Image (tube, helix red, strand yellow):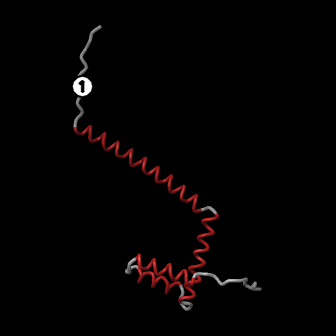
Amino acid sequence: MEESKKTRVRRTVEQRLADLVKKQSEVVERQRAAIAKIEEAKLRLMQKPSVRKGQVEQAKRFTRAAYALAPEWDQRHFIAAIELALAEDPETLQNRGEKLLEEHGKGKRGRRPKNG
């Protein structure tokens, strides 16, 4: 048996850089897969009936409040108002919107007669 001394092979800078780039791409790919999994879970949750019911209720509140504040406006007016509001402070707009939804977004109490 011949015993040969093992020599350590030094990797070049290019080889080490290539390994780092490969490792980075693997990490990025794992992150993408994890984000896709999270997005899929969010989508499943958004499809639940309880969430849809809440979204429908929010849409109704918005419609009632919009009609109470500006009954003569249509979609074009609202789009233009949104464009103008983008220049405002978001925090101030959110607080004011919550107050207005609370004030004007509630439905009328009692039964409604059936049309037809």
Q: Residues within 10 Å of mark 1 (few under 14, many from 20)?
A: few
Residue furthest toward the top?
1
Q: Quadrant of the N terminus?
A: top left
Amino acid type for the residue under numbered disc 1: Arg
Residue at 55%, 80% (x, y): give it.
102
Quadrant containing the C terminus is: bottom right
Q: How many marks?
A: 1
Residue drawn at x 57%, y 87% is: 67
Image position of 54 (left or right of 28)? right
Q: Quadrant of residue 65?
A: bottom right
Q: Nearer the viewer, residue 57 or 106?
A: 106
Vertical placement of 93 versus 34: above or below? below
Q: Where residue 26 sits: x, y (%)?
A: 39, 44
- Is residue 48 toward the left or the right of residue 21 in the image? right
Work out whether 56 lies above or below 15: below
Which residue bears the numbered disc 1? 8
Determine whether 1 is above or below 111 in the image: above
Residue found 29% across the figure and 41% down from its top: 18
